[in-house]
Image (tube, grey):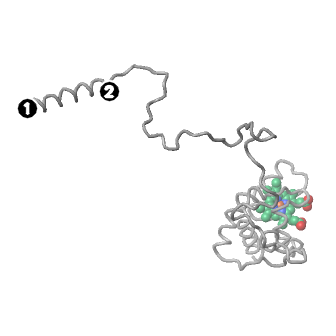
Amino acid sequence: MKNLTRLFLVVGLVMLVVSCGRGNFSEKPPVHLNPNMDSQGKYKAQSESNFFVDGASMRTPVEGTVARGELREDDAYYLGKDANGEFLSKAPMDFTEDMVKRGKERYDIYCMACHGAKADGDGKILFYKYPIPPANFHDDRIKKLSDGHIYNAITEGWMNMPSLKAQVSVEDRWAIISYIRSIQQN
Ligand code: HEC
């Protein structure tokens, strides 16, 4: 019994010393006892393919494919338009305090540089000689614009104003409108 313990100890020590060996470089990949599905033939995004005629591994989606959560059927919400394609006079939801708060935050980020901190069209951009003065939201003409029209201005741009649809989400566009309406009342 004693001898057996000693044998185990010696074998263990030898294994320990051997496993600690440093500086032995190897060109071979490390031993991978159970590779599971780690190594398998596959195409990576944007990679080349000999299989498809166009040489690309990525396929274009079938026409009419809609990504999950991207079905934008609600024209009122996504376009600011009614069933006849006319701009909605009022937003398709009730404005809440949270919306106004979020809207102010987004306005300050995305609109203030041009339309000014007081929304009077007196933004910093004028300092750089922007050729057309941005709209003054306290103007009677702008006050009378429909919610749908403002939504569309943010989404598609308006004459000399660029589209901001890439920067401002649909939800935030409505929030900004709720904020603009709240300050127009003052
Ligand atoms: C790069 C500067 C710039 C930014 C940023 C900008 N605007 Fe404008 N905006 C303008 C200019 C310039 C006009 C006037 C365009 C014209 O009449 O040619 C304008 C006009 C408008 C109008 C009036 C449209 C009309 O029918 O006369 C609205 C509403 C408006 N902007 C909303 C916004 C909102 C909301 C944001 C932020 C989400 C925003 N803008 C961001 C420059 C800007």
Residue 15: name its quadrant.
Answer: top left
Task: Give the position of the N terminus as an image quadrant.
Answer: top left
Amino acid type shown at disc 1: Lys
Say above or below: 46 vs 79.
Answer: above
Say above or below: 145 vs 130.
Answer: below
Q: Provide residue 69's location: percent of width, then percent of height.
A: 69, 65
Disc 2: which residue: 19
Q: Provide residue 181's location: percent of width, then percent of height.
A: 76, 74
Q: Which residue is found at the position 66% from the left and 41% from the top?
A: 43
Q: Provide residue 76's location: percent of width, then percent of height.
A: 80, 74
Q: Nearer the viewer, residue 95 or 5?
A: 5
The tag earlier along the polypeptide, 2 or 1, is 1
SS for dot 2: helix
Amino acid type shown at disc 2: Ser
For marks 2 and 1, give the one nearer the viewer. 1
**Going by the image, does 122 lie left or right of 100?**
right
Disc 1: which residue: 2
> Disc 2 versus disc 1: distance between alpha carbons?
26 Å
Quadrant of the picture in which ligand 1 is shown? bottom right
Q: Provide residue 86's location: percent of width, then percent of height.
A: 90, 75
Badge 2 vs badge 1, beta-carbon distance below 8 Å: no
